[in-house]
């Protein structure tokens, strides 16, 4: 290896003593030899630091170990930044201390970036493995495409498998370190990257992502996941306008608020969801005239209750925005899902849920009463001894209040 390595592999490490050797060895065993390995210990209490120091002693020119001065646990973002600061490479490859790199991944990615100087980073797919190293079926990571929509897709969901990323030093110098206040600091980090640089994708498995009981993401509850995602959106709303790049664009800031509304609704915080929805139209007033954009975004939100709620709230923004949304091709798909699910619930004799979904469907689109599945569902509700409620719904749909 040269005195200045081309690639720095950054391994934040916390209590993964049994997995850390495989992680370090996968970095040292790359077909691309010009690699240094920096292991940053995050206050481990299981001997992880000692494992890393043994590798540093055995490979003094290739492995270095750093730790927080107080030897306490500071979190993923802070420990990534700790590994980053002494790194010397032109390219950086972050991955976790319980994951494993494919043997040729760095070679493939370095060549890819060498040939495409317009890209800031390249990522790929990761294959899940269990604690014993057995390959599982699921693969994570997705091709986000190229161009302006990449940033918006990342705001909607983190489609980048962080352990597969190879990025240029210039990227970090431009966007700065990870936000240490966030648990999902890597997600917010990729969004900032995408606001300034194009992103490439290699459609192959580049690393193995280990799933086990103590991993940060695998052990997160739904409530934890929602809270962490909301923290990312709050940070983007706070720093976006001054972060530079396309994060400050009105449509991106509006999308941040739309995502916030969805996450708040998922947390049963309806007032906060409504406030965020209003802020989306403040951030980008042109959203009022873009029913197609709203329909496309809403069609990617799987929660039927949220879809109904949002369409109902759009009535307050005037100009028949909710009607125009439902007449868009994506909006028609949403309406079809509502009707089909109400019909399915009736077929399954889940009359209470079916009645509630039918009521919502007819509120946002009274003309749905002409659909044969709606009429069939009404009949089943009557037969299922829900007659009074079903007839009220039918009357309301046939004679809507103006």
Image (cartoon, rainbow, N blue to C red):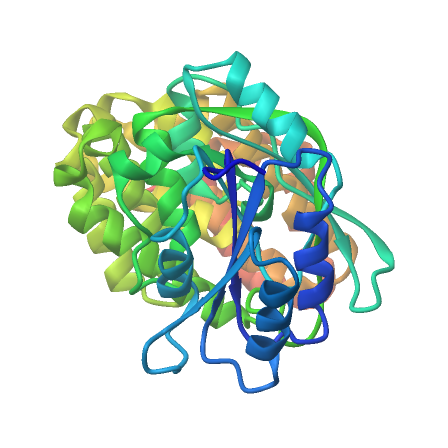
Position of residue 387 measured from the top left corner of the image (x, y, whole percent): 62, 61
The mark total stands at 0
The quadrant in which the N terminus is found is top right
Where does residue 152 sit, x and y in percent of width and height? 38, 32
- The answer to whether one can see residue 324 in this image is no
Residue ID at (30%, 49%): 177
Visible residue check, residue 354: yes
Nearer to me, 41 or 288: 41
Q: Nearer the viewer, residue 376 or 23?
A: 23
Closer to the camera in the image, 89 or 398: 89
Q: Image point 56% across, 52% down: which residue?
A: 61
Q: Quadrant of residue 74?
A: bottom left
| Residue at the image position 68 percent from the left and 58 percent from the top | 23
Q: Is residue 71 above or below residue 110?
A: below
Q: Is residue 13 above or below residue 310?
A: below
Judge left or right: residue 146 versus residue 175. right
Q: Quadrant of the C terminus?
A: top left
Residue 320 rendering spot, x and y as whole percentages = 27, 27
> Is 119 on the left-hand or right-hand side of 320?
right
| Residue located 36% across and 48% down the image | 188
Q: Position of residue 107 (x, y in %)?
A: 66, 29
- Pick the front one: 206 or 56: 56
Q: Residue furthest right?
A: 134
């Amino acid at each position: 290896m040269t005195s200045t390595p081309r690639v720095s592999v950054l391994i934040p490490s916390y209590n993964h003593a049994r997995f850390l050797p495989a992680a370090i060895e996968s970095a040292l065993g790359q077909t691309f030899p010009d690699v240094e390995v920096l292991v940053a210990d995050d206050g481990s209490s299981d001997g992880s630091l000692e494992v890393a120091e043994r590798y540093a002693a055995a490979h003094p020119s290739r492995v270095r170990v750093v730790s927080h001065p107080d030897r306490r646990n500071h979190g993923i973002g802070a420990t990534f930044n700790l590994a980053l600061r002494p790194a010397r490479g032109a390219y950086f490859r972050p991955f976790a201390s319980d994951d494993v790199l494919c043997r040729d991944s760095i070679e493939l990615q370095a060549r890819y970036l060498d040939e495409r100087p317009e890209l800031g980073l390249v990522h790929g797919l990761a294959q899940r493995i269990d604690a014993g190293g057995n390959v599982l079926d699921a693969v994570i990571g997705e091709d986000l495409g190229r161009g302006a929509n990449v940033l918006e897709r990342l705001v909607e969901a983190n489609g980048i498998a962080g352990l597969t990323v190879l990025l240029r030093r210039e990227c970090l110098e431009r966007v700065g370190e990870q936000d240490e206040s966030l648990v999902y600091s890597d997600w917010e980090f990729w969004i900032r990257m995408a606001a300034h640089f194009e992103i490439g994708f290699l459609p192959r498995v580049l690393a193995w992502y280990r799933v086990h009981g103590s991993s940060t993401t695998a052990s997160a509850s739904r409530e934890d996941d929602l809270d962490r995602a909301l923290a990312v959106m709050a940070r983007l709303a706070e720093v976006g306008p001054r972060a530079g790049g396309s994060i400050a664009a009105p449509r991106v800031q509006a999308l941040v608020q739309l995502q916030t509304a969805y996450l708040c609704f998922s947390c049963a915080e309806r007032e906060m969801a409504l406030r965020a929805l209003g802020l989306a139209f403040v951030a980008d007033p042109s959203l009022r005239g873009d029913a197609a954009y709203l329909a496309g975004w809403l069609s990617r939100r799987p929660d039927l209750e949220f879809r109904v709620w949002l369409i109902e709230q759009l009535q307050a923004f005037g100009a028949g925005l909710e009607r125009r949304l439902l007449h868009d091709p994506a909006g028609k798909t949403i309406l079809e899902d509502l009707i089909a699910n109400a019909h399915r619930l009736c077929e399954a004799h889940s009359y209470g849920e079916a009645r509630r979904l039918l009521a919502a469907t007819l509120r946002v689109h009274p003309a749905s009463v002409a659909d044969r599945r709606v009429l069939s569902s009404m009949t089943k509700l009557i037969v299922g001894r829900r007659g009074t409620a079903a007839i009220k719904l039918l009357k309301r749909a046939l004679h809507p209040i103006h």
